[in-house]
Image: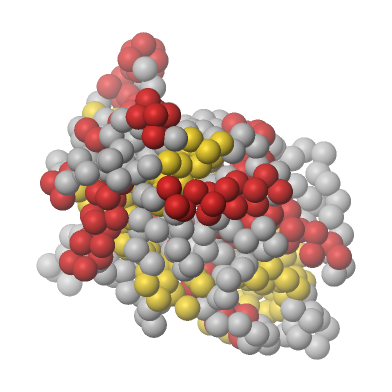
Amino acid sequence: MTYDVAIVGAGITGAAIARELSRYRLKVLLLEKEAEPAFGVSKSNSGIIHAGTQNPPTSVKAWLCVEGNRLLRGGLAADLGLHFVQCGQLIVVFDLKDLPELEKIKKEGADLGIKGLELVDRAWLAGHEPNLGPEVKAALYVPTAGIISPYRFVYALVENAVKNGVELKTSRRVTAIRRPAGGGFELEAGGEVYRSRFLVNAAGLFADEVSALAGAPTFKITPRKGEEYLLDKKREHIANHIIFPLPSKNSKGILIIKTSDGNPMIGPTAHDSGDKTDLSTTDDGLAEVLAGARRMMPSISKGDIIAYFAGLRPVSGKDFIIRHEDAAPGLVNAAGIQSPGLTSAPAIAVMVADLLRKHGLALEAKADFHRTRPRTVHLFQVPPEETRRLVKKDPAYGDIVCRCELVSAQEIRDAVRRGAATLDGIKFRTRAQAGRCHGGFCTTRIIKIMQEELGFPVTAITKRGPGSELIKDERK
């Protein structure tokens, strides 16, 4: 089959583009090198829906962030059944001499169209963020910022795109791209060949390599590592907002991050790396994050931390790269998508669709586009009376598999039926294994349910894809 558009990369950017193109009468292919979507850069995202401040007002990313925020708040999150919390953010200063910097950010934000920006003093902070330390003197309040699950955002986009006809192929690393004489592209991926008239490169850390394979070696991706630390859910109410320090030249700084699932996070660091696979955490990173977080909120302690992880951001210059490559007609690059890429993704998708249209792709709207996706059940997010109703309807909702995160057997079965084929896929969709015991109690039950649903032998079930099997067949 020849597709109209092939998209490389099923992280947040590729998923959003796939969903946007699924509005039209097109044959669209979404290729992902990992075992499941969201297993690349997107799996380590903080889940912040930025308002658009702290980006140069003349940059593409600033305008796309503001538009992405508007789209999410304006109905996209509800359409996709996502749990979006508009908690707002605070950009704090430790010295009143820095108030002019906050005034500058406020003015730039207002110029971008961000509503409700307000400078607040120590008295306001004492009433709204009582756990802030005495070093914090004032802040810029940004009410349109919020939080979302980054993994479930990706899965919702992909599921909705697939419902609307997009073909998803996982475990398909692109190893070669040819440009036939008649135009278009031939992609070798996972031992198979796919043909497409247009190619969208949303390959994250590997976008420079994919672009070069397609004949447009026009940029280089540098991985920037960020270490983050997840706190116990018992500290859920330590902060009411996302809390930023005044940003530096290269980083938004160490943050205190509310999450949509309850566990606060602290971090990230921001250090360039030469290794696109280095996801290690370090003692130095922990010390840096704790020092930054405790300056704003002294009650945070090392004992609050239940998980350490690192992510890599695909950096290429100071702005996003979203453009058609004239050196490879039909190729659109969506690269260098670091923060605020999660927020910007819906707007990036609209921009990419417009670039494809301008370069010859006919966009004929479908009459039967399915705009909505039912909201999935998460017991940890519903009130007790709703839980009782669910259990009465289906007793499997009362069979709690993950006690740390209150995840039922039915939620795990539903996750498998929606596409989870690995233990990490289950974790990202449901939070089972994400608590303080890290799956110590629930992993065997999850494996049993996956075996029943998928028909796999237990030796074929993996954490994150081939090479991460948990149980060895000693007969082999």
Residue 425 appears anywhere in the view: no
Residue drawn 77% across and 38% down?
368
Asked if residue 192 is positioned above or below residue 94 in the image, the reply reads below
Asked if residue 101 is positioned above or below residue 78 in the image, the reply reads below
- Residue 456: where, in percent of width, then height? 31, 53
Quadrant the C terminus occupies: bottom left
Quadrant the N terminus occupies: bottom right
Relative depth, front residue between 441 and 100: 100
Asked if residue 280 is positioned above or below residue 177 in the image, the reply reads above
Task: Residue at the far front: name it.
Answer: 97
- Residue 242: where, in percent of width, then height? 42, 42
- Residue 238: where, in percent of width, then height? 29, 34
| Colour scheme of the picture | secondary structure
Q: Quadrant of residue 6?
A: bottom right
Residue drawn 26% across and 62% down?
288
Relative placement, left or right, of 121 versus 230 is right
Residue drawn 76% across and 73% down?
324
- Residue 22: where, in percent of width, then height? 71, 50
Relative depth, front residue between 227 and 332: 227
Residue drawn 14% across and 41% down?
441
Relative placement, left or right, of 105 versus 251 is right
Relative depth, front residue between 66 and 95: 95
Q: Quadrant of residue 355?
A: bottom right
Relative placement, left or right, of 110 versus 54 is right
Residue 247 appears anywhere in the view: yes
